[in-house]
């Protein structure tokens, strides 16, 4: 088993990333290693370039994201933790795979359509090609499992299509088909202001997204002001039909508490949000506050963070080299 996953440094970690992906990364570190497997996590700084970020901000975000991942429980002595740009094989394999992926496949990617919006002509070529680099990220290491939130599932299905076509066209069994693991407790956390859209860094309302750098007061305030409805909480999940905000907050509570949503609902059945929201705010502060404090402590030593990334990249380069060579050879490149 080889687990590989990444996160873009386009801002700091938010609750959606944490509950949808990173919490699962931390848990897998123990499970996978107990079974003799390997876990690799990276900061997708090359993907960060697909939408313009001022360079100094990208650098700062990459370091801060590394510190946050370590603070959240990714242990660089047990997992390979690195930034994508330091392992050129990602870009090299992406170019090879560009010639396998089809334009029609990329045209179906919903993330590109959402991000480019009406301004398709003005989107970067990188934004369009983004899923091919993502395929390279996982195929390069023969990843067997890729833990992600729901929004990345389509990209991983594309990675499987690319791997299958490469293996067929070049008559090889080089690439392993990666399995997307969308099995975290909260694969799709929604905005706190509008449960119709997912929690994301690009949401225009700062109140809608809880960041792991937020102070205790800010975290509590965002939950207290989260949009809800005037009804009491019912005692069954089915009775929440049509109450998307309530479902979202209960999902967040359950994921933070490592409990089943039905169990949390049973505890709060018959109570209103006036009681539930303060309890959720307290739980979030108690869970996220220590991660933020540890992240701030780590950020004080930039050289140590850089050393983690350098060491991780050296290990990743060693793992990547043989597969890249085999892909080049399979395609007939003279090297
Ligand atoms: P990114 O940086 O947008 O998000 C990182 C992870 O967080 C998950 N996520 C969410 N989960 C639940 N609810 C939400 N509201 C929410 N928002 C984000 C994402 O699904 C993701 O798992 N393309 C990837 C980064 C990447 C990657 C890879 C991932 C690059 N190469 C290879 C896996 C394998 C991305 O933009 O994630």
Image: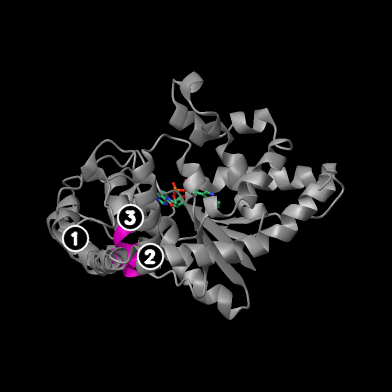
Q: Residue at x 48, y 26 (%)?
A: 123
Indicate yes or no: mark 3 CB to ligand 1 under 8 Å. Answer: yes
Image check: 48 left or right of 61?
right
**N-terminal label among 3 and 1:** 3
CA–CA distance in space, label 2 to label 3: 27 Å
Residue at 20%, 47% in the rendered image = 226
Picture layout, residue 286 above or below residue 329? below
Q: Is residue 335 visible?
A: yes
Q: Which residue is mark 1?
A: 281
Does 162 sit left or right of 216 as displayed?
right
Please tell me how crowded label 3 is: few (under 14), some (14-19), or many (20+) other residues with Cα within 10 Å: many
- Report x, y in % for residue 190: 34, 46
Q: Main secondary structure of the magenta part?
A: helix
Secondary structure beneath disc 3? helix
Q: Report whether 275 appears left or right of 38.
A: left
- Read off the residue under disc 2: 303
The residue segment tinted magenta is 252-264
Between 238 and 251, the residue placed more toward the observer is 251
Mark 2 and mark 1: span between their CA atoms? 35 Å
For label 2, the crowd category at 10 Å Cα-Cα, with few meaning under 14, some 14 to 19 and many 20 or more, is few
User: Callout 2: helix, strand or loop?
Assistant: helix
Would residue 323 be found to the left or right of residue 183 on screen?
A: right
Cα–Cα span, label 3 and label 1: 13 Å
Q: Between disc 2 and disc 3, whose residue precedes?
A: 3
Q: Which label belongs to residue 15?
A: 3
């Amino acid at each position: 088993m080889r687990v590989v996953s990444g996160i873009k440094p386009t801002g700091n970690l938010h609750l959606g990333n944490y509950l949808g992906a990173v919490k699962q990364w931390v848990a897998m570190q123990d499970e996978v290693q107990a079974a003799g497997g390997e876990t690799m996590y990276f900061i997708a700084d090359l993907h960060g370039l697909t939408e313009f970020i001022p360079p100094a901000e990208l650098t700062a975000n990459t370091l801060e994201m590394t510190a946050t991942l370590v603070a959240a429980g990714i242990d660089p002595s047990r997992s390979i933790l690195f930034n994508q740009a330091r392992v050129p094989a990602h870009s090299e394999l992406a170019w090879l795979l560009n010639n396998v992926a089809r334009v029609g496949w990329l045209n179906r990617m919903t993330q590109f359509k959402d991000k480019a919006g009406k301004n398709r002509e003005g989107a970067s070529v990188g934004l369009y090609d983004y899923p091919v680099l993502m395929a390279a990220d996982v195929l390069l290491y023969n990843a067997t499992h890729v833990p992600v939130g729901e929004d990345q599932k389509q990209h991983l299905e594309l990675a499987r299509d690319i791997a299958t076509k490469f293996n067929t066209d070049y008559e090889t069994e080089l690439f392993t088909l990666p399995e997307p693991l969308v099995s975290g407790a909260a694969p799709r956390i929604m905005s706190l202001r509008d449960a119709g859209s997912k929690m994301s860094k690009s949401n225009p309302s700062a109140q809608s997204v809880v960041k792991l750098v937020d102070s205790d007061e800010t975290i509590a305030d965002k939950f207290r002001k989260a949009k809800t409805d005037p009804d009491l909480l019912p005692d069954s999940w089915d009775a929440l039909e049509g109450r998307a905000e309530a479902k979202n907050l209960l999902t967040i509570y359950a994921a933070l508490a490592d409990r089943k949503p039905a169990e949390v609902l049973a505890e709060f059945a018959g109570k209103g949000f006036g009681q539930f929201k303060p309890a959720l705010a307290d739980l979030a502060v108690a869970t996220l506050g220590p991660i933020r404090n540890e992240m701030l402590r780590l950020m004080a030593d930039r050289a140590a963070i850089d050393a983690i990334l350098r060491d991780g990249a050296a290990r990743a380069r060693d793992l990547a080299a043989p597969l890249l060579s085999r892909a080049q050879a399979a395609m007939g490149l003279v090297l």
